[in-house]
Image (spheres, rainbow, N blue to C red):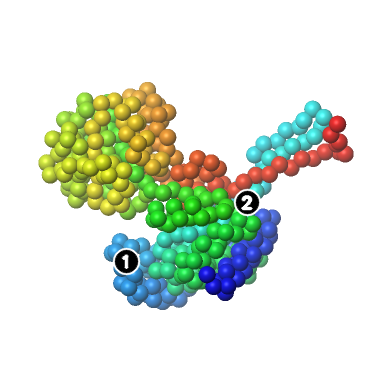
Amino acid sequence: MSSELSDTCLKIATAAKAASRELASLDTSVKDRWLLESADALVSATAEILAANEKDLAAAPGYGLTDASVDRLRLDPSRIEGIATGLREIAALKDPIGEVLDGFTRPGGLRIEKRRVPLGVVFFIYESRPNVTADAAGICVKSGNAVILRGGKEAMHSSQAIVKILGEVAAKVGVPENAVQLVGTTDRAAVGEFLKMNELIDVTIPRGGEGLIRRVAAEATMPVIKHYDGNCHVYVDANADVAMAVDVIENSKCQRQGVCNACESLLIHESILAEALPAIGERLASRGIEMRADERAAAHLPGAIPATEEDFGTEFLGPAISIAVVDSLEQAADHIARYGSGHTEAIITRDIATAERFTELVDSSAVMVNASTRFNDGGMFGLGAEIGISTDKFHARGPCGLRELTSYKYIVRGNGHLRS
């Protein structure tokens, strides 16, 4: 570890801490003006951003990116307009800072208030998607937090162009200069340096592969908001509407396959197996999905291949799904508890009591009843933009938007009160 790298990381974190103190009391109107003017500035700088993006695209083959990864990296005028729209939507959200969560007066006249405050400094590590750079910056600043962005090297030129524009607008409208900083080095050792700085960084949010997230969780000296993977299930109950099941499973699996809330595992009650599974299998096959099925399911699925133990715990992020037959709701819940990741689980049933029982038995950040797993998303929940989906149980769980990037403090007002 070079002393130069250590000094650079320390300088960034120290500047972020100073900016966070200013942001904590920054008026909502200033934050919203920054968001709205940044949106306009990004659109105006479309040519500049696209030129930077071309450099990233030219380097992509050298990084061995898949076609899907290159597509996520690629910007065009409509995608830049989409980034701008995302910032405008954040500006339209209610500012959570200063919200009074509770208030009461003690018998002796002491007045106690519980008020929402920012977390402080967020260290955000994320994949090579330029739009995430702007989204994360917008969410953090609106919630009163300074952010240190450590994006993937594959999108470095694009992210630098975006952050440059955000910084120029910040200087113009009165947002602290170092509210949004992008780590300029691609040296992986820099991540380790930041993870040591619990006195300057209040929370780390890693968004990427399981290896990265496990490394961050192991090394971080500050709290981490994380999810390792999204092995999401759809359970087709004995009382399911078959047509609904077919549509929901197709949407959950196929609407976008490389995302954390896509369905990776299908469970089906044995009593509806013969009626439902052929129709489900036909629909999945028509979408090019490889079905890895247990012995009972495979008997109803021409072309299915035998599922392994590993398949049931795999987040495929592509055209494959595991399928298992269960004899009861409880067995479905046990299967999910064993193989699931606590991200998103769904049940298809016409029985209200069964649905309610499923929501009680299944421990997940979101449980869907007769709805696609793809709805576990901040925008779909009406929460606005999100910085990720947490499978943790403390503080933040599920889509992490503005409120999930806050804490609270108690304000106590007295009149010379003394404790006896």
Residue type pointed to by label 1: Leu
Percent coordinates x, y for residue 8 in the rendering = 58, 71
Percent coordinates x, y for residue 160 in the rendering = 49, 71
Residue toward you, 269 or 109: 269
Q: Residue at x 32, y 53 (%)?
A: 258
390 above or below 150? above
Q: Is residue 350 visible?
A: no
Query: Which residue is at the far top?
Result: 353
Earlier-in-chain disc, 1 versus 2: 1
Residue 417's disc number: none
161 above or below 420? below
358 above or below 154? above
Give the crowd class for mark 1: few <14, some 14-19, many >=20 residues within 10 Å.
some
Mark 1–mark 2 distance (CA, rounded to whole Å): 36 Å
Residue toward you, 89 or 316: 316
For the residue labelled by badge 1, is the local secondary structure a helix, a strand or a loop? loop
For the residue labelled by badge 2, is the local secondary structure a helix, a strand or a loop? strand
Q: How many circles with numbers are drawn on the protein?
A: 2
Q: Quadrant of the C terminus?
A: top right
Q: Residue at x 24, y 36 (%)?
A: 324
Residue type pointed to by label 2: Pro
Left or right? Give the position of 285 relative to 245: left
Q: Nearer the viewer, mark 1 or mark 2?
A: 1
Residue assigned mark 1: 65
Residue assigned mark 2: 118
Query: Which residue is at the far left?
Result: 302
Q: State the image quarter where residue 312 is shown.
A: top left
Q: Residue at x 27, y 32 (%)?
A: 236
Query: Which residue is at the far right?
Result: 416
Left or right? Give the position of 278 relative to 379: left
